[in-house]
Amino acid sequence: MYQALPEFVRTGLAFVVVLGVLIFFHELGHYLAARWRRVRVDVFSIGFGRSLVHWTDSVGTEWRIAWLPLGGYVKLHGQERPEDASPEVRASWIAGETFHEKSVASRAIVVAAGPIANFLLAMVLFAGMFATAGRPVTLPIAGSVVDGSAASRAGLQVNDRIEAIAGQRLNSFEDLQRIISAHPAEALTLTVRRGDATIELPVTTGEQTVMGRHLGMLGIRSNNKVEYQRMSLPAAVVGGVTQTWRVLAETATGVGQMITGQRGAEELGGPLRIAQLSGQVAELGIASLVSFMAVLSVNLGLINLFPIPVLDGGHLLFFAAEAIRGRPIPQRAQEYGFRAGLALIGALFIFATWNDLSNLGVVRWVAHLAG
């Protein structure tokens, strides 16, 4: 039935499902932490704007599903400070259940719980996928051999599968890269599966220097063939935690490289690219979609921890300053910070959308019409 729908409808549905799940768990983290710290939650909304569906639960929280599925929010009771609220609003507050009267530690817990929930969701998604569909492993098969490289001199050929290096068994292309990198300019023996035959090839690795470190080089590229290897539940849980940490570290490194200019900012994408990728990944099956959602969940959690006012990380920065100073940051300073944060987020959104339109060919199409 899904495949019978037009492509743009499938893309839209996949985008709404992916973003809706990630936002729901992010806000659920805030909600559960607020309930734990005895803060009343007035509104839990998925999406912005006019609500399509809404209901109020037994503890007084109004749950909403709004028409614009590009975010969500949790409205905490007494979130504003008393001096910023009108007398009517202050009169409606329930003593002991407002956010502003809680300790700095409790407020920080509520704010940090959103990104933490995204990281936990990624761990669960990765673990569930590893235990059911299996862990995707890029096989150590040569997709191409660089001319003049160590691999070329050793006689490696396209589609050769490297099963071992100096007796160390390989399960993935990543294993191959790790072992070769640790042995620069060394003589090793490769155990290679070529067709139905197993042969041994002596090779002397190449060498390159990266940030002062000497790394080995072989000179082959992967053919990107992936095999799903099912794991036991305990191993899948460990694998989910490890994979989440790996994605987090790689994402943080990539962002750092963009900031320092070591990496092009054209890779930065926004909602349009997420929608496009959601549709494409959904076509590949549920395992690919789950993996994509887990990676996005890590990205969402990390981005929200950036120390930018209006994001969770900005609030945590203000709370840290309050804990050090013994009193809140002055209201005017917070207002300036939030304005700067909004301006920065708005600029990043425009830039990311421009990248999305460029990648989709819209910019070239408009330029062609103008020309």
Image: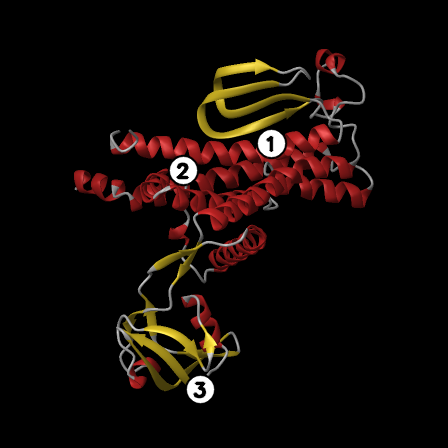
Q: Name the residue carrying label 1.
A: 28
Q: Amino acid at mark 1?
A: Leu
Q: Is residue 180 above or below residue 290?
A: below
Q: Quadrant of residue 332?
A: top right
Q: Is residue 225 above or below residue 116?
A: below
Q: Give the x, y percent position of residue 249.
A: 54, 57
Q: Give the x, y percent position of residue 163.
A: 39, 73
* In this view, the mark in front (3 or 2): 3
Say which mark, if any, is on residue 54.
Answer: none
Which residue is most to the right? Answer: 326
User: In the rendered view, how is the structure colored?
Assistant: secondary structure
Q: CA separation, marks 1 and 3?
A: 52 Å
Q: Name the residue carrying label 2.
A: 271
Quadrant, the C terminus: top left
Q: Amino acid at mark 3?
A: Ala
**Mark 2, other Cα within 10 Å: few <14 / some 14–19 / many ≥20:** some
- The total number of labels drawn is 3
Given residues 146 and 317, the one toward you in this image is 146
Say which mark, if any, is on residue 185.
Answer: 3
What is the secondary structure assignment of the residue under circle 1? helix
What is the secondary structure assignment of the residue under circle 2? helix
The residue drawn where x is 22% and y is 39% is 366
Of the two numbered discs 2 and 1 on the same chain, state the one appearing first in sequence: 1
Of the two numbered discs 1 and 3 on the same chain, state the one appearing first in sequence: 1
Of the two numbered discs 3 and 2 on the same chain, state the one appearing first in sequence: 3
Q: Give the x, y percent position of residue 318.
A: 70, 40
**Mark 3, other Cα within 10 Å: few <14 / some 14–19 / many ≥20:** many
